[in-house]
Image (cartoon, helix red, strand yellow):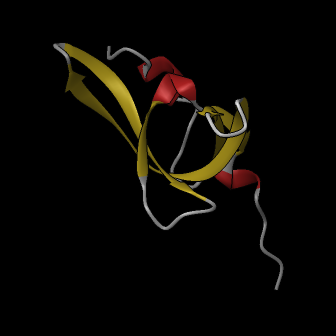
Amino acid sequence: EAFGELHAGTFSVGDIVEWSSWDSYSEQWVQNYGVITETKNELRHNRLVSVSKVLPVNSNTEVEHFTLSLRLVSKSSDITVQS
């Protein structure tokens, strides 16, 4: 198994996730939110790890994150669209 693959099993494409990043300007941790677009296993530094592509809500550019650094906010299956 790839490192983080067990955690990746809890995610699906379309799930809303959050992660923390350090803002050096305000010198504090900030929460970021986005939607998972892909989860895959990649060889990084001679180790197979789980990597997720995420589309942040405040950007049009996908970013890659080590899957273990993501926290689930909402499952895509929990979202209902009313017309």
Q: Residue furthest bottom?
A: 83
- The spot of residue 77 in percent (x, y) is 69, 53
**In percent of the image, x 73 and y 30: which residue is there?**
28
User: Is residue 1 positioned above or below 64 on the image?
Assistant: above
Left or right: 73 as drawn, with respect to 62:
right
Left or right: 30 as drawn, with respect to 37:
right
Q: Residue furthest left?
A: 46
User: Is residue 69 positioned above or below 2 on the image?
Assistant: below
> Which quadrant does the C terminus fall into?
bottom right
- The spot of residue 16 in percent (x, y) is 66, 49
Q: Quadrant of residue 19?
A: top right
> Which quadrant does the N terminus fall into?
top left
Left or right: 67 as drawn, with respect to 51:
right
- The spot of residue 6 in percent (x, y) is 48, 19
Q: How many marks?
A: 0
User: Is residue 66 positioned above or below 15 on the image?
Assistant: above
- The spot of residue 52 in percent (x, y) is 43, 39
Q: Residue furthest right?
A: 82
